[in-house]
Image: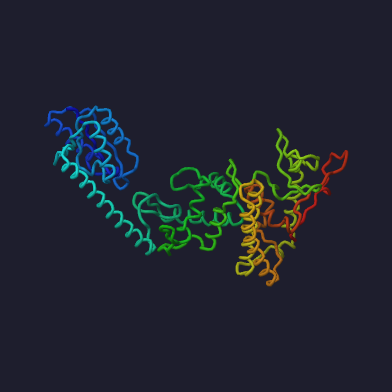
Amino acid sequence: MRAAVYCRLSKAPKVGDSSTNPRSSLDRQEQDGRRIAAEQGWDVVAVFREIVPASDPFKARKEWTQLLELIEAKEVDAVILWMEDRANRHVVTAAELVKVCKEAGVSRIVLPSYEYDLTDPEDEAKFYGEAVRAQQEIARMKKRIRRMQLELAENGQEHGGGKRPFGFTGSGAHKVPLARALAEQEMIREATSRILAGDSLRGICIDWNKRGVAGTTGQPWATRTLKRVLTSPRTAGLREHNGNLYPATWSPIVPREQWEAVKAILEDPARRTNDRGGVYRYLLTGMAFCGVCGNRLVGIRKGDYFGYGCAKTERGEGGKCVQRSAAPVEELITEALFLAVESPEWDRLADRPANDPARGLHEQLARDQGLLDRLEDKIAQELISPEAAMRNRAEIERRMDAAREKLARLGDSRVTARVPRNLRVVWPHLSLDRRRAILKAVLKLPPEGKGIEVYPTGPGRRAFDPNAIKVTWRA
């Protein structure tokens, strides 16, 4: 007689287990199985050992599948299990084993406490009965766990286990000093402010990795990881369970309204990304337009040359409108911005005290303008239907109109960007997305204005002509 021994453990032993052998349970199962085979005078032709949760009966089990294949190949005459529930805890998988055994002529399933004879209908029914009882046990356990998790959530408590969240001390082996958690919370507040100001996940990740900001795993920051941190309800002092939010026992790292605003920006379906992980690759994309036909200017790279050219010309739709080297155009725009920020007039236009009732309205307008811009890009790429775009645009514009009406009643017409006063100094260190956000806040873009218009310089002109660039500023 040829016998196969199958051993299963529900979960891996914890690191630092005090037992002499962390896999002792599997070892005991194999030893008992070999002892049964020796007592019967059988040859053990295969031993299958694996760690698979019994709570998920349909989870792929490599060793279990190999056992069934061995039985189907008629290379086994008997199967040895430690207990019925070591093989399965669901009547469907029990039936699968019985079916394969009967088709292959294997009639004996042996345990230390009982030997099943599958040619006996009563024994077969008993084997199914043990599987049903195991399935009921798992079902009751799941209900108890779900109820306990709901109670923890309703009380605003952590569910326990898992890795330490960024910004929290954690528990057990993952616990860190409070000082580190507080430092991480400051980084979360910084990232929140930067996203609201128009910066990107990519820009923040690059900056943090350069500064050596450590995450919970020690790996470099990636946009997906940072997004998960910033959109997590725990950041706003909330406990999430099955899609519902409950007030948590811990204090929020950022106010809920800021968390919701960041979440809306980062989870906007119209948000554009590319292989580089950013929103745009060029400073003036979407803000510069052809002075001849009104089309947007797009970035053009040919070897060492970088410039902006009319999108219509680049698409080969006929006509040669405008193409200009990027450097002098960008320098002209940024220098004008620097001079404006450094002027005394800027303070009157841009300063806004923390208790200014217009602050929140300006922030809302900036966020909605970003959503509207990304929606336009989505339409251009034909990634959204005109009907859906119309509905989204109408809702965004409705909010923006309402905000403008409130600002008009407050008599507020100031510049909306959160612009550093030392902008000329910090500009080289700002991410591309942060620079674009500042420019978009001070430019009057379509449909309100014409943004940056680039006109031809005339025949035979080679030198850069600043008069061929017209800019519509907000103030």
Residue 122 in percent (x, y) is at 16, 43
Q: Residue at x 22, y 39 (%)?
A: 24
Q: How is the image coloured?
A: rainbow
Considering every residue shown, the one lying at the far bottom of the view is: 409
Left or right relative to 447: residue 82: left
Q: Residue at x 43, y 61 (%)?
A: 244
Residue 228 in percent (x, y) is at 49, 51
Camera-side residue: 91 or 223?
A: 91
Quadrant where the N terminus sits is top left
Residue 263 in percent (x, y) is at 53, 56
Give the number of marks: 0
Left or right relative to 44: residue 379: right
Above or below — where is 173 with respect to 244?
above
Left or right relative to 190: residue 447: right
Q: Residue at x 24, y 36 (%)?
A: 6
Considering every residue shown, the one lying at the far left of the view is: 39
Residue 359 in percent (x, y) is at 63, 65
Task: Name the image quarter holding residue 241.
Answer: bottom left
Camera-side residue: 430 or 139?
A: 139
Camera-side residue: 347 or 274?
A: 274
Above or below — where is 340 with respect to 310?
below
Left or right relative to 301: residue 261: left
Quadrant where the C terminus sits is bottom right
